[in-house]
Image (spheres, rainbow, N blue to C red):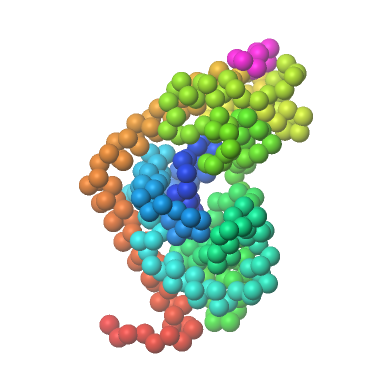
């Protein structure tokens, strides 16, 4: 298919700091796609307020994330990069889609159950409605491809169900999106607990390598990485999750198969594996950190890029929303 027939939408919440799992599992794949697809990338600040936030922190994190996206290689001349709340159509379409989503479908979302257990004092409607807003994000841009992790698969299925239901009732309106599941490096695990996904809000900060970490901090975190009592370097996620995690990080950043990584480390010690992984991460982050500093420190440039992205996204989103409003019977103003 030609580029114009392949549209990708992907978003990330500005909650906490980005880490190397984001670089390996998401952004690295996003950058590759912008040459062959029309790509929409959003800072999902609307999704971020389902948990308690401090206004000043949310603003700073949103600007940081927008800057990190570009530092990681997303080119605003090739992709549409914007902040979600700058495009009101996201919230508008979400309300419409609420009315085409069955309560039982929304109630079955496992993430709602998980998040409710984590924040029992703040089980707000936004947490429950989160997947419908996600569906609106995707369907607004007629995205037919969505890069997701396994934990988002259920949400994508709901988006597909809503899109098909609306199309069947009103004729073809939305693309029914398919998921893209990255293979190597799709999930990076905590350095201190390799059975858990590396996350922004880990209990142990040593398990998460941030994009903003300095070289000394990165080396210290890798040297404390959990391995096992054995001495053999092999890839086996069941028996050797810690070693396998380090091999995945190294192989992905080197852009080759994990089997090649295993061969490279044949005869080496765990200490050497950790140090070489740390050095590889440090080298990979040098240009990214320099670019982030340049963008984030230029307020005029940042504001200009945000406006440009918002305008492009607004135009595309409004086109879809107007079609939806017309089909469901809302009165349209004459231009």
Q: Residue at x 43, y 77 (%)?
A: 323
- For the image shown, how many numbered marks are present on the structure? 0
Q: Is residue 86 left or right of residue 208?
A: left
Magenta stretch, overall SS:
loop
Q: Residue furthest left?
A: 300
State yes or no: residue 267 in magenta: yes
Query: Which picture quadrant has residue 270?
Result: top right
Residue 3 image point, x, y percent? 45, 55
State yes or no: residue 187 in magenta: no
Query: Which picture quadrant has residue 124?
Result: bottom right
Q: Residue at x 22, y 47 (%)?
A: 300
Q: Is residue 320 left or right of residue 238?
A: left
Residue 108 image point, x, y percent? 68, 65
Please report the bounds of the magenta region as a residue range.
Answer: 265-272
Residue 228 image point, x, y percent? 72, 22
Q: Is residue 316 left or right of residue 254?
A: left
Is 233 drawn above or below residue 328 in the view shown? above
Is 60 drawn above or below residue 48 in the view shown? above
Residue 251 seen anywhere in this rendered image of the structure = no
Judging depth in this view, the residue of 56 and 99 nearest the camera is 56
Q: Residue at x 25, y 41 (%)?
A: 298
Residue 54 image point, x, y percent? 41, 52
Q: Residue at x 51, y 59 (%)?
A: 50
């Amino acid at each position: 298919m030609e580029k114009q027939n392949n549209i990708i939408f992907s978003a990330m919440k500005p909650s906490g700091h980005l880490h190397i799992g984001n670089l390996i599992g998401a952004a690295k794949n996003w950058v590759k796609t912008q040459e062959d697809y029309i790509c929409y990338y959003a800072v999902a600040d609307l999704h971020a307020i389902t948990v308690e936030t401090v206004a000043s922190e949310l603003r700073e994190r949103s600007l940081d994330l927008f800057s990190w996206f570009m530092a990681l290689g997303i080119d605003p001349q090739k992709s549409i990069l914007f902040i979600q709340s700058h495009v009101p159509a996201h919230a508008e379409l979400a309300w419409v889609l609420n009315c085409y989503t069955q309560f039982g479908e929304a109630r079955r979302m496992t993430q709602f159950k998980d998040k409710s257990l984590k924040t029992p004092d703040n089980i707000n409607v936004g947490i429950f409605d989160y997947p419908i807003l996600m569906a609106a994000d995707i369907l607004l841009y007629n995205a037919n491809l969505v890069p997701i992790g396994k934990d988002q698969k259920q949400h994508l299925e709901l988006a597909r169900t809503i899109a098909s239901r609306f199309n069947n009732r009103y004729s073809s309106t939305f693309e029914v999106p398919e998921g893209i599941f990255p293979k190597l490096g799709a999930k990076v695990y905590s350095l201190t607990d390799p059975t858990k996904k590396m996350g922004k809000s880990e209990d142990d900060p040593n398990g998460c390598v941030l994009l903003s970490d300095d070289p000394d901090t990165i080396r210290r975190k890798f040297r404390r990485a959990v391995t096992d009592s054995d001495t053999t370097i092999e890839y086996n996620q069941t028996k050797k999750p810690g070693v396998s995690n380090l091999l995945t990080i190294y192989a992905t950043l080197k852009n080759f198969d994990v089997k090649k990584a295993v061969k490279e480390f044949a005869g080496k010690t765990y200490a050497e594996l950790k140090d070489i992984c740390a050095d590889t991460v440090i080298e990979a982050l040098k240009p990214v950190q320099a670019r982030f500093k340049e963008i984030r420190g230029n307020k005029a440039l940042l504001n200009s890029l945000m406006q440009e992205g918002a305008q492009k996204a607004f135009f595309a989103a409004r086109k879809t929303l107007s079609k939806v409003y017309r089909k469901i019977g809302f009165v349209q103003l004459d231009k």
